[in-house]
Amino acid sequence: MQRPTGTIDGDSAAAPGEDRAGDNPAGGCPVAGHGAASPATADASAPGVYVPPFPLRPTSPPPIWKLIGLARRNFLSVWPTTAFANPWLRVAVLRKQIFVCNSPDLVQEAFVRKHDTFERKSAQMRHALEPLLGDGLFISDGETWRRRRQIVGPIIHASKVRDFFPVMAETIAERRAAWAAAGPGAPVDMLQEMAHLTAEIICRTIFGRQLGGDYAAEVVESFTDYQRHIDQIDLISLLGLPDWLPRRRGRAIRRAVARIDKVLDEIITSYEARRSDGETSVIGGLLEARDEDGKPLSREAIRNEAAVIFMAGHETTANTLAWAWFLLSQAPWARQALARELDTVLDGRMPEFADVARLPYTRAVIEETLRLYPPVPILAREALADETVGGVRTPKGSLVMVVPWLLHRNPNLWPRADNFEPERFLGATRGGQSKFGYVPFAIGPRICAGLAFGLTESILSLAILAQGFDAELEPGTDVQPACRLTLRPGETLPMRLRPRASRT
Ligand code: HEM
């Protein structure tokens, strides 16, 4: 089935002239009949209707020149309205074939059953992160990936989350204390607040609680510096550039990497010197790990894997939390339901590990946030051999993608797909979804190694902070999703903190 180059097509005909959604200054939906947050006069405790912002959707598949222009500005805005309901899509850009799996069956076929053919990350992802992560788990494949996954997986596995829990809780409580000290109505950039919080948590988790404040700050700053530079990498390389083409490695990137290597080396050396304190930490796990042949990891491999965990575990969780605060600020009924749950279950005390499982609404807010704004909105893989997916040919070198941004808003899978409804994740059905239709942590052998860690950290952060505070969006703020390597609510998220009267 050959389709014209440079358009998005799928297995159903595109229907031009569909609903147009678009820019949304108040954070509500501009489409007639869709409300923003429930009006203040309504019963604020009954679930209301809120459609949070999403980029303008072309009414029909855009031509190639427009597609590239759109992708450059925001990769989320290339998808026409019709794309969301299609079980698969195919795009041919320049000479690159891109196949998008947009149904649970096809996600399972490509990412689970045909994992061996589609395990390799896209060239764009590898080139963006290789200077920092080297042969690290996140971007390696084949034997290197398999061996590293076997070592790193258990160190941050769900069964270890209990050990990391005290560090998480302590760090979040410190942040709440800082908010309390800032006084009622304090202005914050919630995106930055959450970035600092999750960076602090992951730093202390990787390097141990005793990591000095100076080191922590240096790690955070040096990674931020690197990310600033790779953020500028042109998304067109995702679409077209061949793998062998040399990439520009700016001096700024090399400097940023040298800075990160230096601080990681110093931390590892100082950790080795005081190794025997018995504390659970990722570095301790990596230093003690032995591969299948009984050999320890090299210093470089340890540095690479520490960098992987910091990078993979920090911004994703920060974005999730920032979006959750934004969504709650627009949905008073959800804020009330959350407060009710926290007050009932915790009654003003700090949550313990067992409490996380007793906070289903808090979890549902996080899960719905991850559905609407998946921090990794595109999962792209390169075909290592000629294959088929859903009976469609995917030649060697083509890109096979799962785009959680599309899948999570597929109206055939999700009723009222663009609405914020944490309630859909309550109860036994938990979203009523096949696990292949909801993939914020990816799926298959390359599923996020820190899934339980990230989910627990998000639930706990929201629980501890929302026990003490609500956050209001600064009036007049236009919140729009911005897609770089991760999906975030723009560059800043200005909010004001309002202490909750009754608790903590
Ligand atoms: C809400 C938080 C998080 C989200 C949404 C998330 C999402 C993801 C996704 C989608 C991938 C696969 C990327 C791809 O296929 O291209 C991934 C991989 C990974 N994540 Fe996470 N993540 C989160 C938190 C964490 C945390 C806290 C850690 C570490 C403690 C972590 C460690 C990793 C690692 C090591 C990989 C690479 C796995 C592999 O390739 O085998 N993640 N994550």
Image: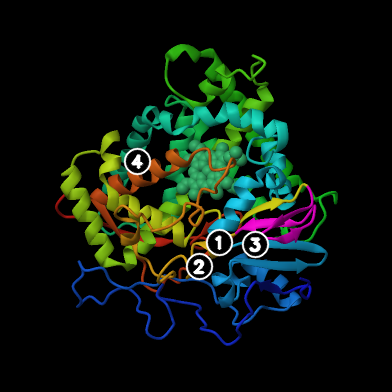
Q: CA distance from mark 3 to mark 1?
A: 9 Å
Q: Which residue is mark 1?
A: 103
Q: Nearer the viewer, residue 456 or 91?
A: 91
Q: Nearer the viewer, residue 66 or 494?
A: 66
Region of the chain picked out in magenta, as a range:
385-402
Q: Which residue is mark 3?
A: 100
- Asked if labels 4 and 1 touch by Cβ distance under 8 angstroms, the answer is no
At which x and y percent is residue 265? Answer: 62, 25
Q: CA distance from mark 2 to mark 1?
A: 8 Å
> Mark 4 is on which residue type?
Ile
Residue 486 numbered tag: none
Q: Is residue 400 magenta?
A: yes
- Asked if labels 1 and 2 touch by Cβ distance under 8 angstroms, the answer is yes
Q: Identify the image quadrant of residue 9.
A: bottom right
Q: Earlier in the sequence, mark 2 or mark 3?
A: 3
Q: CA distance from mark 2 to mark 3?
A: 13 Å
Q: Which residue is mark 2?
A: 410
The C terminus appears in which quarter of the rendering? top left
Residue at disc 4, secondary structure? helix
Label 1 within 8 A of ligand 1 by Cβ? no
Q: Which residue is mark 4?
A: 172
